[in-house]
Image: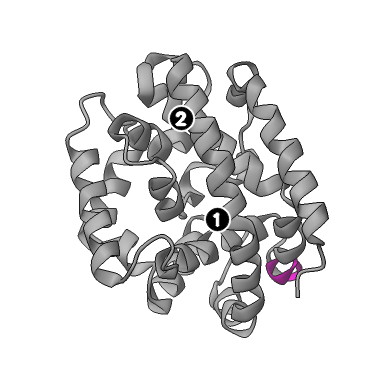
Amino acid sequence: MIGVSNQDETRHTNNLIASISQLNHKLTALMPPASLTVSLVMNYLAHAFLSFEQPDVLAGNMTSDFIKGKVQYDYTGNYFSGIRLHRFIDAFTDAHPINQEVKSIFKTHYGLYAGAFLDIAYDYFVANDTDNFQDQEALALFVQETYNRLNQQTQPFPEAFQPVFSYMQAQNWLLNYREKRGIEKSFAGLARRAKYITESATAYQLFNDHQEELGEAYASFFPQLKIAAFQAYTQLIHND
């Protein structure tokens, strides 16, 4: 069981949500550590789902980690809002006490990469959560709509994201998060791209061994993230 009380969760979530009013000044600084950027971005399903079906926000959310420094200001409107929404989601996720605790499952073996493995594991639960998608058909429809919206994007994607998106579609990453084999492949992809990881088999075994605990963490955390992300999304699109 996750050792964080409901009262503590609520207080911490309220504190995080309270910071949303300062997003315009702070979100551009909310970046993951340099060692965990670009090539390690694997939890695309949650970011797609938390784009709230807005095409330009979706594009910015999916490509945010491929956009560095002042280049972000080359993007306008809701695309830029999506970039900042992605960074808010990452910051909220990383700071949440549930995740601080549950990522210890991976931390002994993978150190700073524990959070990246947890992100991938959460996509398995996002895909199988009937509050998100009633069944596999609903997930498949959402996935196809996501690909379609990205393909129709008029602002150019960052160059580094283009081959990633090609592989994503060809191998249907977003749909395959529903299956354990998809998580296993994503773990392997993380290990191939990470500088200090030589294998992912241990991570996959840990995922299987601790699936119930991870599921409990997801069930407690993700509803809070949906609320916070939607509030951030609403403010960002109205301000931009």
Quadrant that contains the C terminus: top left
Q: Residue 40 at x, y = what percent?
A: 50, 51
Residue 200 belongs to the span the image colors magenta: no
Q: Residue 195 at x, y = what percent?
A: 58, 54
Numbered badge on residue 83: 2
Residue 218, visible in the rendered structure: yes
Q: What element carries label 2?
A: helix
Residue 71, visible in the rendered structure: no
Amino acid type of the residue tagged 2 in the rendering: Ile
In depth, the one of 88 and 182 nearer the eye is 88
| Residues in magenta, as a range | 104-108
**Looking at the image, which residue is at 47% across and 28% down?**
234
Mark 2 neighbour density, 10 Å: few (under 14) some (14–19) many (20 or more): many
Q: Distance between the residues labelled 1 and 2?
A: 23 Å
Amino acid type of the residue tagged 1 in the rendering: Ala
**Looking at the image, which residue is at 63% across and 48% down?**
93
**Looking at the image, which residue is at 32% across and 48% down?**
164
Which secondary structure type mostly characterizes the magenta part of the structure?
helix
Residue 14 falls left or right of residue 211: right
Q: Is mark 1 on a helix, strand or loop?
A: loop
Q: Residue 155 at x, y = what percent?
A: 26, 24
Of discs 1 and 2, which sits in the foreground?
A: 2
Q: Residue 11 at x, y = what percent?
A: 79, 45
| 88 versus 45 height, above or below | above
Mark 1 neighbour density, 10 Å: few (under 14) some (14–19) many (20 or more): some
Q: Earlier in the sequence, mark 1 or mark 2?
A: 2
| 33 versus 219 height, above or below | above
Numbered badge on residue 194: 1
In depth, the one of 87 and 40 nearer the eye is 87
